[in-house]
Image (cartoon, rainbow, N blue to C red):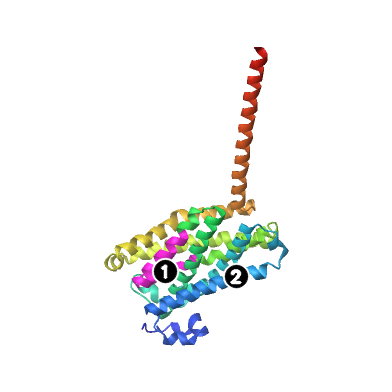
Amino acid sequence: MVALTQFEGDHPLLRLFPALREIDARATETKLVVAACATAVTLATFLLSYLVSFNLPVFRALKTKEKVFWCLSVVRSAFGAVIVVLSGWYWVMDPTLSQDVVKATTQTSFLTASIIVGFFVFEVTALAISDIVFRTFDPALFAHHWLCLVGCSTMCLYYEIGHFFGIQGVMLEMTTPFSCLCWVLLKSKMARTTLWKCNQLFLIHLFHMRTIIEGYMLLMTYRQWDSVMANMPVVVFVLLYTQVVLQFVWLTPYWTYKKTSQFFNPIDFNQSTAEKGTKGAYRGKEGMEHRADKRNDIVSLHIKGS
């Protein structure tokens, strides 16, 4: 069993659930149970959000795909709010994990890692089903979710290392509640309101903060490079830094650009892309019909000339 650090007595998880002080958070059974409970709670939140939202006229007017995304937005917002509190504890109150970015662990960091894995089990399942049913595919979201699931479960729970990156790194999800609120307000035809604009501006600033956090994780890697090289298995190193570099170089800058563009042009990018594809297909069909009519006219003129 992992001993509680001097800072953990007031941790939100232990204050809400005092019985967690007595369990062995490092045991495989505990990890599986906590992850399964997190998945079940996430699924229950999804179903509850559908039942509650169905009373809203704006929700009933949405397409099936948009209703699913609405409920997923509620789930992601709830997870983002909870996980920011749990992760923020280690940024503000408990410096234990940053003292050794590879080997440092705590009772609550194991519990938090299990919660993260449970949520992403739901996320990748919902994403796969949604992509198959609605014939969509978002490579950025796909890469992000799968790398989070595989990386956190492998690094934090199986090898029991890298809790600094897994637990403090999940602070990047601080953008999720505001990103989801942006989409819900957009679908509620409130994109021109002061609330939407303030939320969007704050969201853009949070995406810039993500870049700072990612840079800090790379800085901590540099400062403790000897420990990383000596104690981190190759498979964990590849999974971790693939995720960190992708976030720092591609995902966060791309999402920051998209949200900044959306502030000046408040549209649903996914829907506009679909409509563009449909419009292009229509034009393609129209062009084929026009060319066919033109060939028929040429044939007719040829017959008359004969």
Residue 24 in the image: x percent, y percent? Answer: 39, 83
Identified by mark 1, the residue type is Gly
Magenta stretch: includes residue 245: no
Q: Residue at x 62, y 37 (%)?
A: 283
Secondary structure state at the residue bearing disc 2: helix
Camera sees residue 94: no
In the figure, 48 relative to 61: above or below? below
Magenta-highlighted residues: 144-172
Q: Residue at x 34, y 60 (%)?
A: 238
In the current view of this chain or complex, which residue is farthest to the right? 57
Q: Of residues 130 and 108, which is closer to you in this image?
A: 130
Q: Is residue 74 left or right of residue 106?
A: right
* Majority SS type along the magenta span: helix
Q: Residue at x 62, y 72 (%)?
A: 48
Identified by mark 2, the residue type is Leu
Measured in 3D between alpha carbons, the distance from the residue under mark 2 to the one under mark 1, in whole angstroms, is 28 Å
Q: Which mark is residue 166?
A: 1
Secondary structure state at the residue bearing disc 1: helix
In the current view of this chain or complex, which residue is farthest to the left? 230
Residue 305 quadrant = top right
Q: Which mark is residue 47?
A: 2
Magenta stretch: includes residue 152: yes
Q: Is residue 78 left or right of residue 51?
A: left
